[in-house]
Image (cartoon, coloured by chain):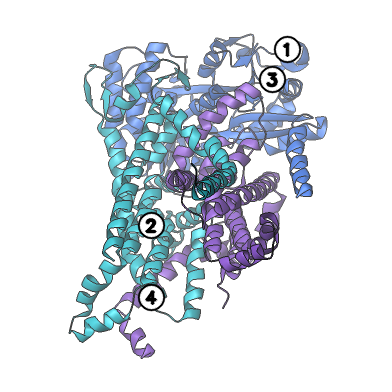
Chain colours: A purple, B blue, C cyan
Amino acid sequence: MADRTFSIARLPGFSTIAVAVFVMLYLPIVLLVMFSFNAGSSPAIWEGFSLQWYPRAWSNELVKDATLRSLIIASVAAVISTTVATMAALGTTRRARTKGQSFIYLLINQPLMVPEIVTAVALLIFFASIKVATGYQGLGYLIAAHSAFCIPFAYLPIRARLEGMDLTLETAAADLYATPWRTFRHVTLPILMPGMVAGLMLAFITSLDDVVISLFVKSAGQDTLPTYMLGQIRRNVTVEVNAISTLLLGLTVIMLSGFFVLTRKKD
Amino acid sequence: MKRLLSTVAVLLASTAIASAEGELQLFNWGDYTSPELLEKFQAETGIKVTVTDYDSNDTALAKVEAGGGGYDLVVPSANYVQIYVEKGLIQELDLSKLPNHANIAPEWLDVPWDPGRLYTIPWQWGSVGMGVNSDAYDGDINTSAIFLDPPAELVGKINVAPEMNDVLSLALMYVGGEACTEDTEVLKKARDALMAAKPKWQSMDYGMTTKLASNDVMASTYWNGAIFRARLQNDKIKYGYPKEGYPLWMDSVALLSDAKNVDEAHQFLNFIMEPENAGLISAFARYANGITGSDPFMPADMADAPEILIPEELQAAGHFLPTCSAKALEYYTAIWTELRK
Amino acid sequence: MPTAEDKASARNARTVWLLSAPALVLLILAASGPLLIVLVYSFLTPGEYGNVEWAFSTKAWVGILYSRDIFDGTWKLADAHLTIFWRSVKLSLYTTLFAFIAGFPTAWFIATRGPRARTALLFLITIPFWTNLLVRTFAINQIIRNEGVLNTLLLWLGVIDTPLAIIYTDFAVFLGMTYVYLPLMVLPLFASIDRFDMRLLEAGYDLYASRWQVLRRIVVPVVKPGIIAGSILVFIPSLGAYVTPRILGGGRNMMIGNFIDLQFGAGRNWPLGASLSMTLLLIVAVALVFYVRFANRESRHG
C-alpha cells in the first residue's frame, strides 16, 4: 500500500524539473569552487590544478583584517542575540497570552520583514549623528546592528524547541519542591540547549553573511569580509575571490551540518 | 560567563587602543593607492595606513559630510577642494611639519583652487577620455561621439563612468558649450544628447580597468591611468582624447577637520612629497604626479605612453574643470539625476 | 477585588515583558527605532552636498512621483522614477513566478521521497540558502559574463560567434535573483506538501481524474498556505534587493534598493532616499497584510 502511494505521487515531469533545479542550484557554486583551484589567473579558463590562491588570499593583509573582524562581530553578535532571544522565547512561549504580545512578536520578527536597505539607511542616519556627538567609532555600532537583526534567527529555533518540550518534566520538578530558577537550570536549560546552539549557529551565519547593513554602518577601516569582497567583485575580479568564497562555503557547510544534527528529532 | 564578558571587553578595548598609536585612515579613490608605498611608509615610520575606498567625488563628499566616518585624509579632485574648504571639512596644513613642501612642481604650486597649497598636497593628475577596444571599433576614437553618438559596432557595449562632473563637462563641450555654464540653451542640448544616447549604453559603473581588459565592456569614458593599466593587460585597448573638449583633473590629499591622527597625517603628506615616493604612487596607478624630480623613479613605459603624453593637436582641448556656481550646480544635479534614473 | 486568577495573569504579564525586555530594547535601538528617524528625515530639505537641513518640506514625497523640469519649470510625472519602481515590481514578480514554477516540482520531489533521502535533499537545498549572498551572486556573475563559463563554452562549441551579452541587463538581474531566492520558495512549499495527505490523490485517481486535474483541484487548494508563504518570502526580499542588481545590473538597471542607495551617495538627496525607503516599507507591509488575510482565510476553511 505504501508503495502505491509513492508511485501515485509521482507527477509527470516533476522529477525531471526537480533534478534539473538541484543541478542548476549547485552548478555555479561547484564551478566557483573548482576555479578556486585554478593554476591560471582567470576565473573562467581552466589551466590546471593548483592551491596557490589560498595562501595568497591569506597573505593579503586586508583579507586577514576583514576576516578577523567578521569573525569577532559574528561571535559577539551571535552570543548577544542568542542570550537575548532565549529570554524572549521563554517569555513568549507556553504561556497565557498577554496584552501586547503581538507587538512583541512584531518587533522580534521585524528584521525579517523590513528590507535590509531600509534598515541600513535608518542605521546610517541614526549612528552618524551619534558618531559625531560622542566621537566613538569602534566596532560597537556594527555589533549592535548585527545583534539586533540576528535576534529573529536565534529566536525561531529556540521557540520551536521550547514548544516541543514536555511540560511534565518541569511540573515534576516543581512537585519535588525545586525553585523556578533551579528548575530552569537543571531541567529546562539542558533540554533547551540544542535549540540554543542551533540558534547560535544560525545567528553566527547570518551575521557573517551580512553585506548591506555592514556597508552602511561601518566607519573607516572597518571592512567586514563581505564588504571587502563586494569591493573586489566590483573592481578587481581575481581568483582570490573564488578562494575566499570557497572557504566561506566550507564554513557554512560545517555549521549547517551541526545545525541539522542538533535539530534532528530524537526518535 | 564572566570570562566571556571580560574577553569581549578586552577585544572591544583593543580595537580602541589600536587606533590611538601609529595609525592613519586614508580615504581615497579605489585602486589608486600603491600598497608598496604604504608598506614603505610603515617600515620607515611605524605608522599603519588603512585605506577605505570610494568611487567618486560625490560619494566621498557625502560620506565626509555625514560625519563620524573616522577618516584623517581625503583625496578630492581640484574642483571639489573649494567645497570642502567652504564647508569647513578640511583644515589648513601645518607647513612647518612639511619640509618637502618645496618639492611641489612650480606649475602645480599656485593653483586657482588652492593658491600656495595651504590645504592640499598633489597626489596625481590626468585626463578623462575614451577607452576603446580596437577589436570592436577601429575608427576615430578622439571624440565624445563614442558615447554620445556611438557607432553601430559599439551600441550596447559602452560604459559611462557615473562621475557627474566629468560626464556633464564632456557632454557640454560636445554640444559647443563650456563646463559650469549657466546657459540654459546649451544645458538643454547637452541633456538631450545624453538622454538620447543613454539607451545605447550598457552600464554606468566603475572598475573599468578589469572590465575593459576582460572584454566585459568594449568602450568607456574613463581616466587615462586606468585605461593605461587596462592596456597593459589587453593590448587592444586604446585611449582617445575627445577633440570637442575633455576634462583635465588633479587629485590632491587634504586633511579633514575632525581628523584624529593629525601628526601621522603630516608625516604621510611629507613622505609623499619625496620624489622617490611620488614615483611609487605614479607607478601603481599610472598617472603623472606633481612633484619635481620624480621622473627617474617612474616606470619606463610611462615616458612615451599615449595615455600620458597628450598629442600636440589635442592639447588645447583639455580643460581643468572649475568649481561650478550654485546655480550651475543645480542644473548639473537636475540633469544628472534625470540621467541616473 | 483582584482574584487569584487576576493576580496570576498580572504576574504572568510581568514575566513576559521582563523576559522580552532585553530583546525589545536592542531591537528598538538598533532596528525599529531608527525607522522613525527615517520617517522624520523624509519631511526635511536636502542639504546642498548631502545630509539634511532642518526645514520642513514635502518635496521628498512629491518627488517620488513628480519632478520639475529644470528648464521650463513645469511639473510632470517623473517617469524615470516610475520606471525604476516598475522594473523592481516586474522583476520581483517574474522572479517569484519562476521560482514557483521551478520550486513546486522540487518541493514535491523532496516530499515524496523516503525519510532518509528526504533529509539528505533538504540538507542539499538549505546549503545554497545559507551560503553568503555575495558568493552566490558572484557565482552567477562568473557564469554569464562575456568571458564567463557559459560564453566560453558556447564559443568553444561553435554555437555562437560573439559572446552573448547577458550581463548588465534586466535579464541578468532576474537570473541572479531567481537563483538566490529559489530555496526560499522550496522550503515553505515543502512544509505544506509534507502535510498533504497523499490518500487524497488516490481518491482523486479512483474517481477517474487526470493527473492535471488532480493537481489543480486537489493539491493546490490544500497546499495554498505554503504557496503563499513561499511567494511572500521570495517577493519581499527581491523587491528590496540591493547586492544582486548592483553586481549584475551594472549601475544602469537600478532597482529600488540601488536607487535609495544613490540618494545617500552621489544623488545627495537624503530626504528622497528616506521617502523612498518608507514607500518600499509600505509596499512590503501591504504584501504582508495580504498574506496574513489569505493564510487566515485558508485555515478557516481547512
Residue type at mark 3 is: Thr
Going 58% across and 43% down the picture, which residue do you hit?
A: C18
Task: Confirm whether circles 1 and 2 share one chain.
Answer: no
Residue C134 placement, left or right of B341: right
Q: Residue at x 59, y 11 (%)?
A: B114
Q: CA distance from mark 1 to mark 4?
A: 72 Å
The dot on residue B94 is 1
- Residue drawn at 35 percent across, 43 percent down: C285
Position of residue B283 relative to residue C150, above or below, is above
- Residue A244 coordinates in the image, percent (x, y): 61, 55
Left or right: C300 as drawn, with respect to B271: left
- Given the image, on which type of amino acid does mark 2 rest? Thr
Which residue matches tag 3? Answer: B292
What label sits on residue C109 in the rendered view? 4
Mark 3 on the same chain as mark 1:
yes
Q: Nearer the viewer, mark 2 or mark 3?
A: 2
Q: Earlier in the sequence, mark 3 or mark 1?
A: 1
Quadrant in which the C terminus of chain A is drawn: bottom right
> Which of the marked residues, 4 or 2, is nearer the chain's N terminus?
4
Residue under disc 3 on the same chain as residue under disc 4? no
What amino acid is at disc 1? Answer: Asp
Work out how far the residue at label 1 is from the one at label 2, CA to CA, in angstroms: 56 Å
Q: Badge 2 is on which residue?
A: C178
Q: In the figure, B72 relative to A210: above or below?
A: above
Q: Which structural element holds mark 2?
A: helix
Q: Is residue A146 above or below residue A3?
A: above
In the image shown, does C208 or A137 lie closer to the viewer?
C208
Residue A216 visible in the current orientation: no
Q: Quadrant of residue C297?
A: bottom left
Residue A240 x/y as whole percent: 61, 53
Labels 4 and 2 share a subunit? yes
Quarter containing the N terminus of chain A: bottom left
